Image (tube, grey):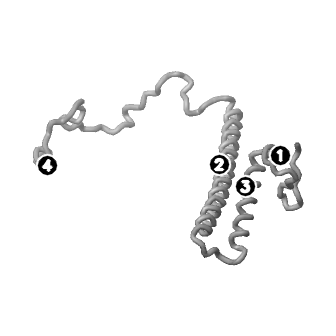
Amino acid sequence: MSNTYDESGQLIVEDEFTAIVDLTDDDILKYTQRQRKRLVVELTAEGMPTSNDERTILLATLNDMDRTALSKKKINAATAGTEADRTAAMAIAKLYAQLGNYNPAVNNAGVIPEPDQRALPQIEVADGETDIGIANETYDEFMARMES
């Protein structure tokens, strides 16, 4: 069965049971949202309801409508994020292809370059600076050593 829609995009339901059984996921969302809207219109036809039961039903219906709308917005935002990730990946692939599959961050020679020792400053190593392990020094001992 193919679904039929009116000019406003509303699903035309001829046989209620058949229509519900044959709905797609998007059609189900449209259908339930439309039913919630009908309920809200019916409950507020004569103004805000005065009965606590009707107010509870109205608030729950409005909450469900809000939750559905927010969920759809989250899905749309995630879809947009996925599209941005895809675009970035394509740009990276294009750059990679332009470099001829050469990664400039990798030294292709396999040799680690040795720095020019004359260009490095001379340093003085303090006692214990190159020791490996846990230092067993108290705060007072440290402060005394630093003050001297």
Q: Position of residue 61 (x, y in %)?
A: 64, 62
Check residue 142 in the rendering and tell me which mark sits there, or answer none.
none
**C-alpha span from label 2 to label 4:** 55 Å
Mark 1, residue position: 18
Check residue 32 in the rendering and tell me which mark sits there, or answer none.
3
Q: Position of residue 86 (x, y in %)?
A: 69, 42
Mark 2, residue position: 78
For marks 3 and 4, the one nearer the N-term is 3
Please give the name of the residue rendered at 69% of the width and 36% of the height, measured from the top-left corner.
93
Q: Position of residue 75 (x, y in %)?
A: 66, 50
Badge 1 amino acid: Thr
Badge 3 amino acid: Thr
Left or right side of 7 for 56: left
For marks 1 and 2, the one nearer the N-term is 1
**C-alpha span from label 1 to label 4:** 84 Å
Q: Nearer the observer, disc 3 or disc 4?
A: 3
Classify mark 3: helix, strand or loop: helix
Q: Nearer the viewer, residue 59 or 66?
A: 59
Q: Name the quadrant containing residue 60.
A: bottom right
**C-alpha span from label 2 to label 3:** 23 Å
Residues at circles 1 and 3 in contact by the CB criterion of under 8 Å: no
Mark 4, residue position: 143
Q: Nearer the observer, disc 2 or disc 3?
A: 3
Q: Quadrant of the N terminus?
A: top right
**C-alpha span from label 1 to label 2:** 33 Å
